[in-house]
Structure formats: C-alpha cells, structure tokens
Image (spheres, grey):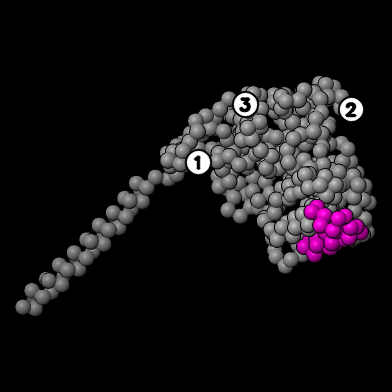
Amino acid sequence: MKKNFFISVLLSVLLIIAALNLSTFSQGKKKQTQKTEKDPYEFTLVHQIKTTPVKNQAKTGTCWSFATTSFIETELIRMNKGTHILSPMYFVRIAYPQKAENYIRYSGTNNFSIGGQAHDVMNIIKQYGFVPEEVYAGKNIGEEEHNHGEMDEVLKSIVNAVQKNKGGKITPRWKEVFESAIDIYLGRLPKEFSYLGRKFTPISFRDSLGFNPDDYVELTSYTHHPFYEKFVLEVPDNWNRGEYYNIPINDLIHLIDTALTKGYSVCWDGDTSEKSFNRKKGIAIIPQVEESESDDKEKDESDEPVAEKFITQEMRQDAFDNQTTTDDHLMHIVGLARDKRGYKFYYVKNSWGTKDKKYDGYVYMSEIYARLKTVAIMVHKDAIPDQLKLKLGIK
C-alpha cells in the first residue's frame, strides 16, 4: 500500500518535470523562429560638419528661426569663433511686430503667421544683432518647452481687430498693445547682457564674433522665372518679399554637394508633408511606386531600400505649381552620406528634439527627395562654385 503510494507520487513528479521541459523547449523554439526586423537602410557619413546640439521648437511654427540659428551657430564654429548656443526666440520676438506692421499696412492682405524664411533671421541680425539662448530663452509662461498656441491666436486677434478699423482710423496705440502682449509671452528683449565674463549689447556681440549677414545668399530652382536671375519667391512665408537667385536643379544639387565637401553647411527650406518623409524612421525618400497603407508591412519586412523616382526640372515645377510641394519646414543640412547601395543621402539636422527619434533628431534625406521637395537653400557665398558665382554676378 505504502509502496504504491510512493510510486504514484514519483510518477506525478516525473510528469511535471517533463511538462516543464517541454514548455521551455517550446518557448525556446518559438523565440528562435521569431523574425528579427532588419533595417534596409545603413548609412555611412562621407562628410560631416561640426555643429551644435539639436534643439526642440516644440509647439511652435518657428522652424525658420531654429534652422537658421543652427546654421549660424555652425558657421561660427567653422569660422573658429567657438561654440555658442544662440537664441531662436530672439529672432521670433523681433520678427513678429514687423509682420504685424506689414499686415496692417497691406490692409490684411499680407501674410501674418508663425512662419518665416531664413533671410528673416539675417535681416534681423543686420539691424539688431543676436544673443545667446541663456540670455533670452523666450519661455515666459512657466513651461519647460516652447508653446505658442495661445500667443499666436492672441496676436492674430490684435492685428485683425486693428485691421478692421472700427473707429474710422487706426490709432498709434495698437503697436504698444501688440508689443506688450508678446513681451508677456516671450519676455522683454535684452538691451545689454553679460556673457563669458564680458558685457555686450546684441550688436556688439555680433560684431565681436565677426559675423556678417551680407555673406549669405538664398537660391531656388523654378522655371516660371528666368534662370541665373533673382526673383521674389511666391510662398506665403516670404512675407517681406525676399529675393532668391534662380538656378537649374542640377546646379542647386551640385552647390549643396560642393558646400558640404568644402566644410560649409546648408540651410534647407522645403516640403516635409509627404508620407515618405518618415518621422519615426528618420528617412525622407520619393518611392518609385506610390504605396498604400497595405504595402507598409511588406515594405517594413524588406531587406532592401526602396527604389526611388527619377526627378526632372519639369516634375519640380509641376509639384510647385499644383502645390503638392509647399514651403512648410526649414532644416539644416550638415552632412553627406551613402547608403549600402552607394546612393546619396543628406544628413539633416531637424528641430523636433531627440526624444523617440531614431537618429537622435537627424533625418537622412535622399538626393531624390531633395531634387523634388527643396524649395530653397541658404549658403555662404564662398561655398558657391566659382563658375556659378560668375553667372550670378556674386562677388
């Protein structure tokens, strides 16, 4: 009786051990058969320009200031002036009243918005200089990140109320109201500040670093105006009607490549609204075949990069004319890379922070994407190939 009991217990233990071993084997086999997702894109940087850390424009539409500020910081490094983190909000604070005045003078027909262009920053530097970010952070509402949602609406309400001219004439007081409102949100501009043990004004700080905004030019590439001449680029954010040199797209791409190889970075203005501008993966391409959502899984499982279209000057123009290419974002090109096929990509510094970003706030943009979606660029005039400078009359 006792013997039968012990045999029964022993058999039960053996069965439990066998079951556990089978479960472990099954789980191990399952792990082995799981497919590891491969990234079809592997990049090697060929040229990389030393730059400053990635910033975060957060809940603002001020990419124009962030990209151009990064561009200037990088220029100061190239000029051996040291590493200085400048304030993007300094330029935003000064530009807003200028936009407001234009809006009123044009009876509400000029663009008044959060957007802008690279030359807006240069125009401000020419007249008002620049300041370090530690001196003017532009965060005056008690939040860690920039948030202009409320401010933008308040400022729009002010200029729209003035433009309606309900009193029969516009009073001189509206500018004081506007300035007071923007000061409340961003803070008052510094007239003098201490930095690195010295006292500066914004203009003397600019001069101490030897930065000359007149050394920089903007270029674009569209056929509705003659090549190798200047014209006012017809995009809403060109609110102060800045002029751009117009060159063929092959010249524009060659200029970007030449600049990078010579150690100059490039401020980039273009369209990032395409689905193929993938924020999660940090890739910007123009697929040869338009892909539906049902294709995404198959594309993700592919070991090979996506084949891209061949872009012509005519395709660029069509996209600009039908507004599938729009001027919606500025970034900063600081490098040139090759993928595993040897295809060219630009290493682009964005201003959307680094959190949850595959390449720590950078984007790899294919040359194909740049050919179609670049609206304009800004470069130092010495980065331009001599033959092109001659054609444009740039000295």
Residue at the spot 56% in from the left edge and 27% down from the top edge:
309
* Element class at badge 3: helix
Residue at the spot 68% in from the left edge and 43% down from the top edge:
329
The image shows residue 294 at horizontal and vertical percentages of 42, 40
- Could you tell whether 152 is left or right of 39 in the image? right
* Element class at badge 2: loop
- Which callout, 3 or 2, points at the residue further toward the start of the chain? 3
Is disc 3 in contact with disc 2, using a CB cutoff of under 8 Å? no
The image shows residue 46 at horizontal and vertical percentages of 66, 34
Kind of residue indicated by mark 2: Lys
Numbered disc in front, either 3 or 2: 3
Residue at the spot 72% in from the left edge and 25% down from the top edge:
224
The image shows residue 120 at horizontal and vertical percentages of 81, 44
Specify the label residue 315 is tagged with: 3
94 to 238, vertically: above or below: below
Residue 188 counted in the magenta span: yes
- Which callout, 2 or 1, points at the residue further toward the start of the chain? 1
- According to the image, label 2 marks what residue? 395
Q: Which residues are magenta?
A: 162-191
Residue at the spot 70% in from the left edge and 65% down from the top edge:
143
Pick the front one: 178 or 70: 178
Kind of residue indicated by mark 3: Met
- According to the image, label 1 marks what residue? 39
Pick the quarter of the image with the C terminus: top right
Numbered disc in front, either 3 or 1: 3
- Could you tell whether 353 is left or right of 133 in the image? left
Q: Does the rendering let one see residue 88?
A: yes
47 to 28, vertically: above or below: above
Q: Does the rendering let one see residue 334?
A: no
Pick the front one: 287 or 210: 287
- Which callout, 3 or 1, points at the residue further toward the start of the chain? 1
Numbered disc in front, either 2 or 1: 2
